[in-house]
Image (cartoon, grey):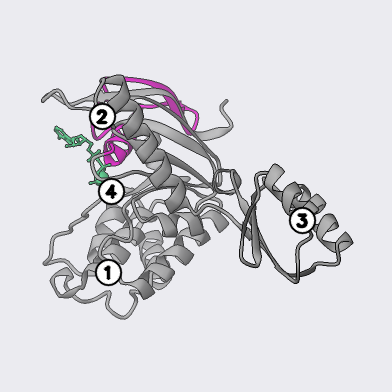
Amino acid sequence: MSDFAVDIETLRKRYSNGVEALAGVSLQVPYGSIFGLIGPNGAGKSTMVKSLLSILRPTECRGTMLGEKIGNKSILAKVGYLPEHASFPDYLTGRQVIEYAAGLANLSRAACRSRCDMLLEKVGMTEAAGRNIRTYSKGMKQRIGLAQALINDPVVVFLDEPTDGVDPEGRIDFKNMISSMRGDGRTVFVNSHLLAEVEQVADRVAILTKGRIIKQGLVEDLTRRDARYEVKFHGQMPVALLEWCHQQQMKIEGDRITCRADGPLQIQPLIDRLRAALVVIREIKEERFSLEELFLQAVTQSREESATAKGGKP
Ligand SMILES: Nc1ncnc2c1ncn2[C@@H]1O[C@H](COP(=O)(O)OP(=O)(O)OP(=O)(O)O)[C@@H](O)[C@H]1O
Ligand SMILES: [Mg+2]
């Protein structure tokens, strides 16, 4: 059996209008992790989730989810889903939406009541549960959407743009709720273009553009690659040390030295030399690429590559 909750060897989806939304994607989501699928509008993120949930029929798909072949509908009993732009009948109350989902999940009346209460509490909607959806703000609807996605105690939860329309304070709640799903042992698959948010919550990410994954891995590893260190000093730098820094491709501007390094070990020789030359070190700062920088870099690079392949200007 696969070690991964979602293990896609290849997934391709061409819509009937000829749009190739997914061009043979491969990705792995370890059990118990939070996985962020990030990409610009139209990248294929929702198509990916809908294909995994059998809402769409992929053109080609080889892979497993929870140990079963993708496409096998029996897996869906262990899956939760918050669709993008989720909308619920606005004449129902928040509680009735969740009860309806409980009915679909075949929960007994007693289990339904206790689970509804627990989930309403969890998403901060206990007080508003008896009001009609039509009186809810967007953020409140998303909270109910999140609760209904958890009604069947799923092993894996798919959240398609969960914080769409949610205000900054609410987003912090969502971040905590998503983290707590991992704490409950669930695997969470989040689609988003809000990179800073994904960076704070996800263990692994994949960057998808135009139906292709151009990078995937642990957030920690991806953002550490090409990390920079900035060393601020005080005093005069001896000429020999300046020359050594230049030889090492370090940049010196005013009272700061910037160098590329994968980890702290690589900047020790600089520190040793500064100390030996009695130069005072005022500050050492590690600067990682943020997910946003990494994303923009990867997307620009992929655009340039495809323009070059077509023989045009990037
Ligand atoms: N039902 C459909 N029929 C034809 N083309 C579609 C259909 N649904 C999506 N597409 C196209 O497939 C591509 C991927 O769309 P998708 O909705 O998966 O992107 P997305 O990454 O979720 O975008 P967003 O961030 O805007 O939600 C787009 O070019 C889109 O126009
Ligand atoms: Mg989408």
On screen, residue 69 versus residue 167, left or right, reads right
Pick the front one: 104 or 197: 197
Query: What residue is drawn where x is 28% and y is 27%?
Result: 307
Q: Does the residue labelled 3 lie within 8 Å of ligand 1?
A: no
Which residue matches tag 3?
A: 239
Amino acid type, residue under disc 4 in the picture: Leu
Q: Residues within 10 Å of mark 1 (few under 14, many from 20)?
A: some
Q: What stretch is highlighted in magenta?
A: 43-72
Work out how far the residue at label 2 is from the one at label 3, CA to CA, in angstroms: 44 Å
The first of marks 1 and 4 along the sequence is: 4
Work out how far the residue at label 3 is from the one at label 4, CA to CA, in angstroms: 75 Å
Q: Are marks 1 and 4 in contact (CB under 8 Å)?
A: no
Q: Which of marks 1 and 2 is in front?
A: 2
The first of marks 2 and 3 along the sequence is: 3
Residue 139 is tagged as 1
Q: Does the residue labelled 1 lie within 8 Å of ligand 1?
A: no
